[in-house]
Amino acid sequence: MFTSPDNAFVPTLPTQRMRGLDETDRKLLRALLEDGRRPYSELAESVDLSAPAVSDRVDRLRELGLIRRFTVDLDRTQLHEGTPVLVTLRAAPGTGNRLLQGLRANPAVEHAFLTADETVLCTAVVPGASVDVLFDDGVATADVRSYEVALVQESVWTPRLDDAELAPECVECGNTVSREGERERFAGELHHFCCSSCLRTFRERHDRLREGV
């Protein structure tokens, strides 16, 4: 237990071992990748669980950050709002991530990627074939050394799960958390740790903050 600032004792939930993905989790994720609007009753039937049990699993996957949101796969070919383009931008040294974040905030941009050599690629829908809209608010032209534009004929976006293992980041040191890792809730939020040492360090710092030291 730890002591809160008003001297009231607040229990800490027991530490739990890191739990990976089982086959039921994988089936649920594959089904949601195919259609994120599937009702829990349909998902429950496909994995032989009750709808409440499926809801609990989905909530856990969202809490882990594995499911970030449920969205719509929009078919741009049915809309006539502009021209779909693929843009390759070569960032000035040290500005790649800033350029990526600026493009990410632009409503014209659908997907954006940053490579190790600070090249940024993005797909966007722009008026006519002009990419000037990409250099509006949030993107400084000084961050771009050069860029190339290609018209998109067709695009396919297929996220895959395959046999990937759950590997969150340790909140204390940043290392990957394996099945030997641990997890514990602090202030109602679940955190993952790669080892007991990181958990202990984080817990001690958390308790000191709660105690006002």
Image (cartoon, helix red, strand yellow):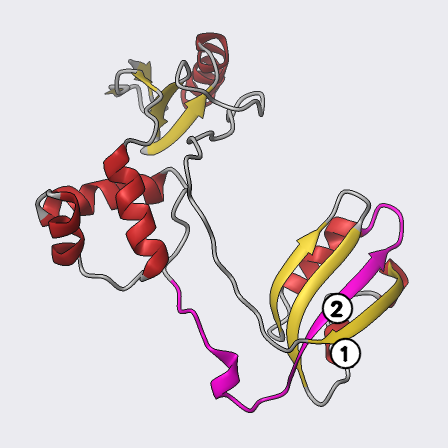
Instruction: Give the amino acid type for the residue marked by disc 2 in the picture.
Output: Val
Provide residue 134's location: percent of width, then percent of height. 73, 73
Residue for point 68% across, 64% down? 122
Provide residue 63's location: percent of width, then percent of height. 34, 40
Number of the label disc, if any, that sits on residue 131: 1
Instruction: Give the amino acid type for the residue marked by disc 1 in the picture.
Output: Val
Q: Distance between the residues labelled 2 and 1?
A: 8 Å
Quadrant, the N terminus: top left
Left-right relation of 99 to 60: right
- The residue identified by callout 2 is 87
Q: What stretch is highlighted in magenta?
A: 71-95
Left-right relation of 107 to 135: left
Residue situated furthest left in the rendering: 50
At mark 2, the secondary structure is strand
Whether 90 is among the magenta residues is yes
Number of the label disc, if any, that sits on residue 165: none
**Residues at discs 2 and 1 in contact (Cβ within 8 Å):** yes
Residue for point 45% across, 48% down? 160
